Image (cartoon, rainbow, N blue to C red):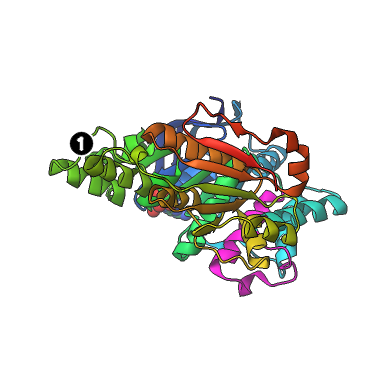
Amino acid sequence: MTSILETRNVGYSYGDGTEALKKVSISLDEGKKIALVGPNGAGKSTLMLMFNGILRPSAGEVLFHDRTLRYDSASLREVRRKVGMVFQNSDDQLFAPTVYQDVAFGPVNLGFPEDKVKKYAGYALQYVGLSGYERRPPHHLSGGEKKRVSIAGILAMEPEVLILDEPTSNLDPASSEEIMEMLDELNLGGKTLIISTHDVDLAYRWADDVILMEDGGVLHRGTGQEVFGDAELIRRARLKLPIVVDLYKELVGRGLLNGSKPPRNVLEFTDLLVSRTQGTTSQKVLGKIYICNVDGPDLEGIKSILEKVHVSYTGAMGTNAKIMAEQARIPLDFTYGVIDKCILKALTGKNSMIITSGGMIDHSIKRIRAYCEEFGAKIEVIKLAQPAESSMNSDTQKVLSQKESTKLIEVAQ
Ligand code: ADP
């Protein structure tokens, strides 16, 4: 693993003498989803502000790509372009009279020529699903939309790392899930993501790497299962257990379940219970999961693909897919947690469809395949090729990886 950001013995005291960080030494891996968790005052925000040089350590050093951060204005400009920071309160971030001006601020400030600014800002707004909002004043937008504009402002500078302080605070559950899904999409595109949160359920299901902070230091670090599996440490940090872990521990305590590792999510929990009560899931007739790629075909193309397939449930994953589904008036049953929900439906014998695009297609297939391999299920995944792709692949209509537990069929339309 390559380290992208590192702190060595970093300490920080605010002007009033409050010691917010005490000799923090951590290394963050490139391409990971990292969550800093801890109670209020643990030092999460202060540590985040160190990563792009907004704060300068009172002791120790911060490294980006193994190089010690310098604090002259040229070095700071460079690191702030590559390590973007989204503040907790969008109103602290958004200040321009229009959405476009806000998103374009970063590239303009970096001295990009006008055509490049337009291109980057336009692309960033499209990515967050806000094309058409250019002239709107940011303060008239909803909380979720403001957060998207803040993210677009960072994306317009093409960062390698996005740091988000409490990205879901003050958002309703659907907006929160949409923001987290957008972060997943960015991560699939190769970006390193660092969030701070005291939402333990969110950190548990989302992060690859959890850093538990308390009183200006790192108390524990590892996967969600490693960190949240230690109930004593979580209590010490004045946090609660994620609901899935709490329930699992209760059932283990009562002798109804056994196992050394808590399930990661509702899907795995359900599977654990089902296999305990009914044996493995592989004995049942499972539903199929269709994957429809919206890259390329127009709305009519998508509608004609979907008309040929009959499913009980449809979900869309990613901003583009959701916009396409809305334009094509396709009713959606799932707009977040789509892959796991489709797997859950397959386990009850129902067919479902994931409408998505880009890297999310391979991600969906891998996730379903990984689930099947781990739990011995056989869910058929059918990739619906778009017209352009189907002509390209017409000689490749085949069943891929038949030896594997997941059968992937490419269906040309
Ligand atoms: P967290 O993000 O985990 O809530 P912070 O990094 O905001 O923690 O705070 C760490 C410590 O620093 C707390 O004791 C907090 O009161 C203090 N602190 C944060 N910001 C300031 C500030 N601007 N001035 C003085 N003390 C501060």
Q: Residue furthest left?
A: 254
Q: In this orientation, does residue 69 appear?
A: no
The residue positioned 86% from the left and 50% from the top of the image is 113
Which one is in front, 385 or 188? Answer: 385
Q: Between residues 168 and 378, which one lies in front from this camera angle? A: 378
* Residue toward you, 330 or 64: 330
The quarter holding residue 228 reads top left
Q: From this view, report whether residue 17 is shown above or below residue 225.
A: below
Q: Which residues are magenta?
A: 129-156
- Observer-nearest of 371 and 121: 371
Which residue, given by chain and number where applicable, does mark 1 sit on?
A: 258
- The percent coordinates of residue 364 (x first, y second) are 54, 43
Where's residue 176, x and y in %?
49, 59
Disc 1 marks a residue whose amino acid type is Asn
Residue 296 is at least partly visible in this image: yes
Q: Quadrant of residue 376?
A: top left
Numbered-mark total: 1
At label 1, counting other C-alpha atoms closer than 10 Å, the crowd grade (few under 14, some 14-19, many 20 or more) is some
